[in-house]
Amino acid sequence: MAAENSIDGEAIVMGINPKIAWQLQLFAGIITLVLGAILAFHPTFSLGAVCVLLGIMLIVGGIFHFIRLLDHDETHRVWLGVAGLVEVVIGIVLIRHLDTAYALIGMLVGIVWIVQGVVALMAGILGSANRSRVWPVIFGVISIVAGAVVVAMPLHSTKVLAILLGIWFLVMGVLMVLGGLFIRSDLKKLARG
């Protein structure tokens, strides 16, 4: 049950004033729409930006490990040095070799889908008799096939995945904007009534 309070006659739901909630919903929807448009219409650019940002984050993390390595009281200095070196190298590869980074992202997504599909397939085959086994088996087979396709062609699949994710963000953005406008409309009705 939602926690409701009242401040100056206005209902506060979950700690957020409804007059602000619709604006936050609308703002989040607009940002989601913009991200969806960028991903859907410029997948190569958006994937490149993600790879560069991830590379920068890894390089900064590696430098942080190197700084901690200088502390003589640190008990795991060797592991910090190894982790720092690996992070810096992977960060540089992500920034410098974008095609390799795209392929790695595609490979990781494909492997996750294959593992997810095998787990769902096994759950469907070995599941209890009183539960439906059809949907887990169908989901498992589709996930395995999709994962195999992505692993076989990671570079092309990553761009397609970015476009599909962009379309998903566009749909979610529209729904969030509409949700914000519906909240605003309900608030106007409550104010009149």
Image: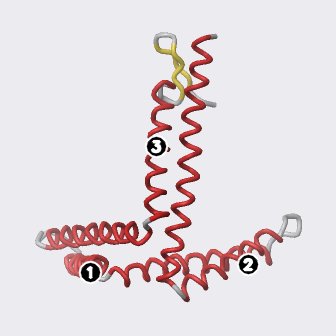
Circle count: 3
Amino acid marked by disc 1: Arg
Mark 1–mark 3 distance (CA, rounded to whole Å): 32 Å
Give the crowd class for mark 1: few <14, some 14-19, many >=20 residues within 10 Å: some
Q: Between residues 189 and 141, which one lies in front from this camera angle? A: 189
Taking 98 as reference, is 33 left or right?
A: right
Give the crowd class for mark 3: few <14, some 14-19, many >=20 residues within 10 Å: some
Report which residue position mark 2 lands on.
122
Report which residue position mark 3 lands on.
28
Nearest to N terminus: mark 3 or mark 2: 3
Q: Residue furthest bottom?
A: 152
Report which residue position mark 1 lands on.
96
Amino acid marked by disc 2: Met
At x 49%, y 63%, the residue is 40
Residue 62 in percent (x, y) is at: 22, 73
Q: Between residues 191 and 85, which one lies in front from this camera angle? A: 191
Taking 28 as reference, is 90 left or right?
A: left
Question: Which secondary structure lies at badge 3?
Answer: helix
Q: Is residue 105 above or below residue 188?
A: below
At x 57%, y 50%, the residue is 172
Q: Quadrant of residue 80?
A: bottom left
Nearest to N terminus: mark 1 or mark 2: 1
Mark 3–mark 2 distance (CA, rounded to whole Å): 38 Å
Image quarter hosting the C terminus: top right
Amino acid marked by disc 3: Ala
Residue 191 in percent (x, y) is at: 57, 13
Nearest to N terminus: mark 1 or mark 3: 3
Taking 123 as reference, is 158 left or right?
A: left
Q: Quadrant of residue 100?
A: bottom left
Question: Which secondary structure lies at badge 2?
Answer: helix
